[in-house]
Amino acid sequence: MASSQDAWYLSLLGLAEYFRTSSPPMIKCCIQCLQAVFNFKPPQRVEARTHLQLGNILLTHTKNIDLAKNHLEQAWLLSQSINSFDDVKFEAASVLAELYEQQEQISLSKPILRKAIELSQHNVYWHCRLIFQLAQIHATEKDYTLASSLLGVGVDYAHISNASYTRVLFLLSKGMLLLIDKKLQEVQQVLNQAGHLIETWTGAVYQKEYVKVYFLVLQVCHYLMAGQVKSVKPCLKQLQQSIQTIMASDDVFMGPSAGDMFLWMPKEHLYVLVYLVTVMHSMQAGYMEKAQKYTDKALMQIEKLKIVDNKPILSVFQLMLLEHIIMCRLVMGNKTQALQEISSAAALCKQSPRLLETHGPQLHTLLGLYSMSMNCMEAAEAQFIAALNTSRERELWTFANLNLAIVYLRGKREADFNALHDRINPESLPSHSHSLRAAAYYVQGLQAFFQGRYNEAKYLRETLKMANAEDLNRLTSCSLVLLGHIFLSLGNSRESMNMVTPAMQLASKIPDVHVQLWASAILKDLNRICGDTQQENESYQRHVNFSQMLLTDHFQASQMPEHNLIMWTHGNFPTDTPTTSNSLI
């Protein structure tokens, strides 16, 4: 029978739980009961658990972070020396480390997690969870080598612990970090290993489908990062089929091992992610209307999920969708809508310093592209330079440098263009991307065109070859129309017609209004040379229609207060610029 002292604190614990689970919860009373437990000098186990409960409740229901932290520190300190007390010991370590991380005290998080990992080797679930948590911290610090090494330890530990599902999760997480770190050869080895494990899977079907979606997302991203838009299609189709299977199934993750209880992300978030990679593919391949359709669907899904639980990852997905659809709008000649969406992206970044830090360079690049489309070349130059100064991403550097080179070509600034030569030379491009290398050949061809060196159109032949190999429709149409212009300048009207006609057809399919404008001007001249008055008039009318549409849109965009964003190159956004979400978000 419990002593009177035991009865007191046991009654207080019971009362605290009653208040916590009341409807609505009576949190103040719950906290008072738990704090009163310490007056009875309970056993160390009860004291540690009570500190953990108080820490969690204060974190969840109050703004008293310091007091919560104090209780969690006490829980971790007291529980370390207690045997067979894993749930309190490791939860205290995990929650406390997460709190330190949120307060940007990562130097305090890491030793706690290392100690907890050392103590948890007998507990498969907690050992795996703590390894994931420490690897995440190293990844946040961009120490991808150490994070990957930790995940490798997780792969081996899960294997010897018969946690087959978690072994694949560790492996795929390692692959994801290698992908971020651009270690593409190592990525392929990891993906091959994971692919084999998934193919020979003998566990639960649902778990297999789940890791298959994760695997296929990485495969698709691997291809897209390499600019291989055509090669990715079979993987993307498989991914779209697998996510449908996942969405139609029940969430059953319990496997034979206690360690098989982890999720990369909830299936609802995976669903949005599949939309996102589909938009990325459509934009790169030049299917702008398809990208627009899937962006609208994904943004609506994000809006629904945010109402239930506004997780930070949803804002990241939202921002990435906006980044891609903005580029589509600019290609389609819709600068007004692109500017509204740039403003929405800026609003998301304004709400989160972390998002501004990670996506600021992309925002500068988008403002540079918008400025180019508005013929604001000084602003475009400033934005691309801001992107280069704030990014460490090799692909973004190359993309910004290629566009900066076009700004210099359009401004007849040969010295500045030549200064970029080593960074945009297709033969020694720092990027591994097939599409960026093809684009670099196009810029070389553009330079030859601007300098009147028409016989050096070999660069454009290389662009065409590379673009056709991977279905890069927009690059193909741009190269064809430029070749058509070159042949027209050389007096070869037949060859010019052979280039411009398919360029116009492809640009209409994308649709790329700027290539259509350019092609219609060349077709007008070609039809005049051929003496085909009717076709000449039709081409002229098309040219007028495209010009009028672009001019109207140009004027509308220039009058919008958001246009002032092109002046933002660092620090806070311009104060007189509205950065509000549009109706899609």
Image (cartoon, helix red, strand yellow):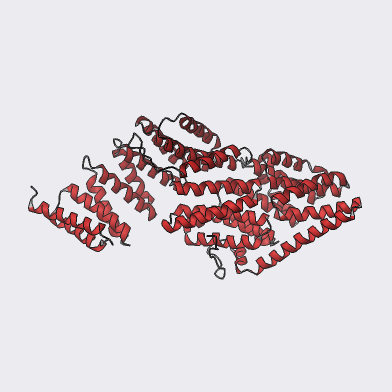
Residue 508 image position (x, y, % from top left): 73, 51
Residue 572 is at least partly visible in this image: yes
Residue closest to the far front:
248
In the image, taking residue 21 as reference, residue 549 lies left or right, namely right
Q: Residue at x 30, y 47 (%)?
A: 91
Residue closest to the far right:
531
Q: Residue at x 92, y 52 (%)?
A: 531
Front residue (pair 201, 156): 201
Q: How many marks?
A: 0
Residue 105 image position (x, y, % from top left): 37, 53
Front residue (pair 534, 68): 534
Q: Residue at x 81, y 47 (%)?
A: 484
Q: Residue at x 22, y 52 (%)?
A: 50
Residue 388 is at least partly visible in this image: no
Residue 390 image position (x, y, % from top left): 55, 54
Where is 421 relative to 319, above or below?
above
Residue 495 image position (x, y, % from top left): 84, 43
Front residue (pair 499, 123): 499
In the image, taking residue 258 as reference, residue 557 lies left or right, namely right
In the image, taking residue 105 as reference, residue 37 lies left or right, namely left
